[in-house]
Image (cartoon, rainbow, N blue to C red):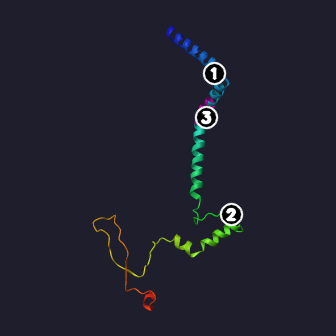
Amino acid sequence: GTTLTTLQAENNERKELLDVEHKAFIHRMLDGYYNVLHKYRWVVLLVCVAGMCACIVVAAQLSLPTSSVVALLPPSNEYERHRLWSQNLLSTELAKGNGGVASIAFGLTAADTGDHLNPDSFTTLVLDDSFNPSSEEAQKF
């Protein structure tokens, strides 16, 4: 009996204190926002899940691009025409290749003059004294 009425009185007193504290505009707005969100929380959850499923379906139907080239300018633009022209150059095609760079040097002897026990030491080039670049044999490769 008395314990129940005491609890009810304390509960009413707490509600009155909360009503006094929430008289500010921001508190009323946040309290209203919370009450609406709490009331419709399952609807909000279902809408979010449905939106996520719709995004997944749309993303799965997107096709992959056919090339990695992105043209932001129309083909009539001077800069775009220059980009298209430069893509057809041999140097651009070679730069895009996956191979490595090879250098050919004539008039050298195959020699390793570096320190064999020190991998940080470099070799020096050894010239072939018998190499004559003006001869016909040297110009045939």
- For label 2, the residue is 73
Magenta-highlighted residues: 34-41
Residue at x 59%, y 51% (from the top left corner): 55
Asked whether 5 or 23 is in front, the reply is: 23
**Mark 1 and mark 2 in contact (Cβ < 8 Å)?**
no
SS label for mark 1? loop
Report the quarter where the C terminus lies. bottom left
Classified by dominant secondary structure, the portion drawn in magenta counts as helix
Vertical order, 63 against 107 (above or below): above
Rendering quarter of residue 27 = top right
Q: CA distance from mark 1 to mark 3?
A: 22 Å
Q: Residue at x 66, y 69 (%)?
A: 82
Q: Which residue is mark 1?
A: 22
Image vertical order of residue 65 relative to residue 35, above or below: below
Instruction: Kindly identify the amino acid type of the residue bearing the numbered disc 3.
Output: Tyr
Q: What amino acid is found at the position of numbered circle 2 in the picture? A: Leu
Q: Residue at x 56, y 57 (%)?
A: 60
Kindly give the residue lying farthest to the top in the view shown: 2
Residue visible at 57% across and 49% down in the picture: 53
- The secondary structure type at the circle numbered 2 is loop
In magenta segment, residue 37: yes
Counting from the top left corner in percent of width and height, residue 63 is at 58, 61
Q: Looking at the picture, how far across and down is residue 17, in whole percent? A: 60, 16
Residue found at the very far bottom of the displayed protein = 136
Q: Is residue 64 magenta?
A: no
Question: Which residue bears the numbered disc 3?
Answer: 40
Front residue of 30/8: it is 30
